[in-house]
Amino acid sequence: MAWTGNILRVNLSDGSIASEALNRDWADQYLGQRGLGSKYLIEEIDPNCDALGADNKMIMATGPLTGTMASTGGRYSVITKSPLTGCIACSNSGGFMGNELKNAGWDMVVIEGSSPEPVYLYIENDTAELLPADEIWGASVWHAGEWLHKRHQDPLLRVSAVGRSAEQGCLYSAIINDLHRAAGRSGVGTVMASKNLKAVAVRGTLGVANLKDPKRFMQAVNDAKKVLAENAVTGQGLPTYGTQVLMNVINELGALPTRNTRDVQFDGAHDISGEAMHAPRASDGRPNLTRNAGCFGCTIACGRISTIDKGHFSVAHKPGYWGSSGGLEYEAAWALGADTGVDDLDALTYANFICNEDGVDPISLGATIAAAMELTDMGVMTAEQTGGIEFRFGSAEALVKGAEWVARGEGFGRELAMGSKRLCEKYGHPELSMTVKSQEFPAYDPRGIQGMGLTYATSNRGACHLRGYTVASEVLGIPEKTDPLTTDGKPALVKAFQDATAAVDSAGLCVFTTFAWTLEDIAPQIDAACEGDWSVDKLLTVGERIWNLERDFNLRAGIGGDQDTLPQRLLKEAAKTGPAKGLVNGLGEMLPEYYALRGWSADGVPSEATLARLGLN
């Protein structure tokens, strides 16, 4: 079996740490990571608990393929109740932490209670202890990591930590590992900081050697790696341009949300694209992109490492910040760039570095700054209220200052740290918040890509592209091409993507593999690694079970079908340019059919028959 069979339970309130056996029945029903972690959370907390209270729990969970030779098998997820949305939160991260945790012998770490003083959790194989974090409380993630490596004299130590933004209560703070990989959305870092837990530091040397059929597993893994290498997206596009390969594509499609989604195309898109990251700068002749990078076990290597022009206004006052670090990926480049109207590549890179250093979700940050810019355009917000800087569309200065203030919890940054929904409500214009269930939506305009509108509206963690990436089909033609401008067939497409993605997330694999792989490629790897029979049909049932489990949590938390909607701008204001010109999103046409396909009532509640079929009743 690929599970270690061990769970580490940490009670921060009384300082106790204990190991316990993994529930094998649940592992068979939910696989691992997202699914299994969600099952544990839902069994152990009240959905109506205070997300930032001691009764909420935080689970760090690996998948059964985490730490194995499977390509991209280095993932882990953080599962908790979100302070931003009130929904169940599950944020997935790459890098090397997942592998380290699995190699230390743990399938997951369940963190409960709240420490009276700042602490960090140190794990070395089967030994774990809580240690004082007073010296790094108030430090950035990068400085905390540096201190921990020196403290334990171990350069191979892996650290997941929160920054100052989480300590100051930013509702969309992330947990950062390996300097620039993130469990990034829904405020999981805010929950961690609320428990006075600064970091989790792990060293694992035990390996993962308990596969069901090692020979068959390696054959399945090698076959799957060949598929990735020969695919145009995973073998060429992503290694060369990263996810930024999409910037110009989505802009030309007329589906790039621009200036708080008032527009669907950005005239500065090329200047902040993957191609622009490769081009020599006029100032110093060097490109923004230094190299690409991969997470543990990854054969795609879509990560970006960038270097900023040290003479640029945004970094000149902060020595050392022009050094290489995690570069722009598509979602961050869109949120910090097109959505705010800023086309300064170095300013975007710097703002993204701040998000990495202090654990801030760049999607929510950029979208919230964009909302502030529209409030300023309307005359509702003034420079006097925003720290002496006018938050105008296109202002790189406002973007950079906003990012710095949120990271440090200073001045107007405290209002931006609430997220766009609460910010817009405070200033009397809730309609300007581009959110679903209080979470800012990502870089695809639902007027130009209809299926993404339904995906956002029904996502269990608030607006999210990674819960059902129909862009693969509607734009890239994977696994088959569908028309992005029509609603026909989209409910079935969205459901299929959502169920399959839940299974992939639970395996310990990166969802980017699905640009090339189908479950036909993934099932043989899981079946050779894990006890039981893991067919494609079983994985789809597991995915559907997870989706309904998450839905049930949200319903019990008071988040029902009335929140399966989109901002009115997307439903009533037609796209002004591009192929989608004249279109709004057809959510009203898609949602009833989606509910029926899910086996839910007309108001979005799973039927007793659906729950019984999935073993959830």
Image (tube, helix red, strand yellow):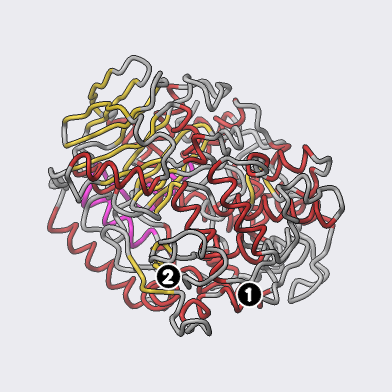
Please provide the residue range marked out in magenta: 519-544
> Quarter of the image containing the N terminus?
top left
In the image, residue 437 sits, relative to residue 266, either above or below, namely above
Taking 441 as reference, is 506 left or right? Answer: left
Q: Residue at x 22, y 44 (%)?
A: 150
Q: Residue at x 51, y 71 (%)?
A: 244
- Amino acid bearing label 2: Thr
- Tell which of 548 and 150 is nearer to you: 150
**Helix, strand or loop under label 2:** loop
**Helix, strand or loop under label 1:** helix
Q: What residue is shown with label 1? A: 269
**Decide: marks 1, 2 in contact (CB < 8 A)?**
no
- Tell which of 270 and 382 is nearer to you: 382
Please tell me whether residue 221 belongs to the stretch shown in magenta. no
Please tell me whether residue 527 belongs to the stretch shown in magenta. yes
- Amino acid bearing label 1: Ala
Taking 385 as reference, is 232 left or right? Answer: left
Corner quadrant of residue 482: bottom right
Q: Residue at x 30, y 27 (%)?
A: 132
The image shows residue 140 at horizontal and vertical percentages of 42, 44
Q: What residue is shown with label 2? A: 307
